[in-house]
Image (cartoon, helix red, strand yellow):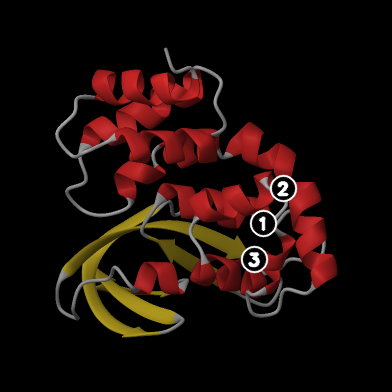
Amino acid sequence: MIGRLRGQLVHKQPPRLMLDVGGVGYELEAPMSTFYELPTVGETVTLITHLAVREDAQVLYGFVRESDRALFRNLLKVSGVGARMALAILSGMDAARFAQCVEYEDVAALTKLPGIGKKTAQRLVVEMRDRLEATLTPALAGAAGESAPGTDQALADAVSALVALGFRPADATRMARAADDGAKTSEEIIRVALRSVNPA
């Protein structure tokens, strides 16, 4: 299983890109959320990958964030959702935003994504609810810290702590971001976030 690749970006043309890793060119498919954060051609990039093996092909998918790959893998388990639709979902929103849609049963937001009808959106809400809690929590907890290079680690640590305290990933991310001013330690962010839930 190929789980990660680091190499020179040779070509990028959505939804495909190519990495040169030690002289070997790896072709990957990726959502737009990944393309938005790719460097210019010729620069080095690290991508988290998922290898899909089918009877007629082996396809490698690349993602900037672990949370996006985790969501992609879980979407593939939903009835009627294939790799194309999973890429479309991740091209329209990141894992944290998708978690919010599922938690708040925001079918309308999901149907705005290409190829997602009302019935499919409703099925995603129903089938993904348990998976988000069971398998995406660690990845989503770190999503805030992955959102952009250089983001303060304190924010990601605070989200992880809030999740450990029992808050849902989407709520933990929202609370931590609202409490963070870019200068607080993780402990201070947690304190402010908890105070917003239980004001003195």
Residue matched to label 1: 75
Element marked by disc 3: helix
The residue lying at 27 percent from left, 18 percent from top is 187
Q: Between 169 and 128, which is closer to the camera in this rendering?
A: 169
Q: Residue extending furthest top?
A: 200
- In the rendered image, the quadrant that contains the C terminus is top left
**Secondary structure of residue under mark 2:** helix
For label 2, count other residues whose C-alpha is less than 10 Å away and answer few (under 14), some (14-19) or many (20+).
Answer: many
Report, in whole angstroms, how far the alpha carbon at label 2 lies from the one at label 1.
8 Å
- What amino acid type should be assigned to the residue bearing mark 3? Ala
At label 2, which amino acid type do we have? Met
Q: Position of residue 194 (x, y in %)?
A: 42, 20
Q: Nearer the viewer, mark 3 or mark 1?
A: 3
Residue on which the image places disc 2? 128
Residue at 43% across, 51% down: 3
Evaluate if marks 2 and 1 touch, with contact meaning CB atoms under 8 Å apart.
Answer: yes
Looking at the image, residue 126 sits to the left or right of residue 139; the answer is right
